[in-house]
Amino acid sequence: MIGYLEKNKRFSIIFMVLMAVEIFVISSIPGRDFPAVGIDPSLAYHLIVFFLFNFFLILSIIGKKNVKVKYLVLSIVFSIIYAVLDEIHQFFVPLRLPSVRDVLIDAAGVSLSTITYLYYKRKI
């Protein structure tokens, strides 16, 4: 599947945009109506959604080209900037507040997706 997405960058771009839209829509929902089950489910959501966002962004940028550090740095920086902007956006949503913790979890998802991509390419 990854090979297909590398060859057909338009699908990677579509999935990346869909992830960006989902992040924006979910973060636009007022309040936090998560059930208390011990571990905050939003932690897993942040990790997974930014993992996918960055992974599709990497595939969109690199495609079939050789892996270069500058492309990976570009995807990491863009993804983390998007995470920060998402938290700033939440400041304007009723009953929501920006959180440094969420940005750090988003950055962890971004890092994991980069490591996963490098492992897939056998660069680590």
Image (cartoon, rainbow, N blue to C red):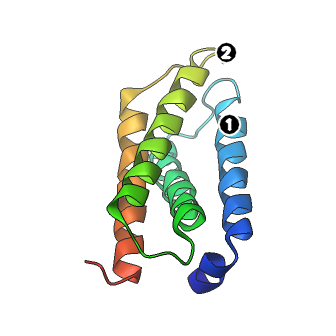
Q: Residue at x 36, y 33 (%)?
A: 101
Choose between 61 and 122: the one closer to the eye: 61
Q: Is residue 7 above or below residue 114?
A: below
Question: Label 2, on which residue?
Answer: 94
Q: Is residue 41 above or below residue 101?
A: below
- Which circle, 1 or 2, is nearer the viewer? 1
Question: Label 1, on which residue?
Answer: 24
How far from the left and from the top, in percent, is residue 70?
A: 37, 56
Choose between 12 and 86: the one closer to the eye: 12
Residue 113's image quarter? bottom left
Q: Quadrant of the C terminus?
A: bottom left
Q: Residue at x 67, y 15 (%)?
A: 94
Q: Quadrant of the N terminus?
A: bottom right
* Residue type of the residue flagged with mark 2: Pro
Of all residues, the one furthest to the left in this rendering is: 124
Q: Is residue 57 left or right of residue 25?
A: left
Q: Is residue 81 above or below residue 31?
A: below
Count the labels in the image: 2
Q: Residue at x 44, y 40 (%)?
A: 80
Q: Is residue 109 visible?
A: no
Q: What element does badge 2 sit on? A: loop
* Residue type of the residue flagged with mark 1: Phe
Q: Residue at x 37, y 28 (%)?
A: 100
Residue 121's image quarter? bottom left
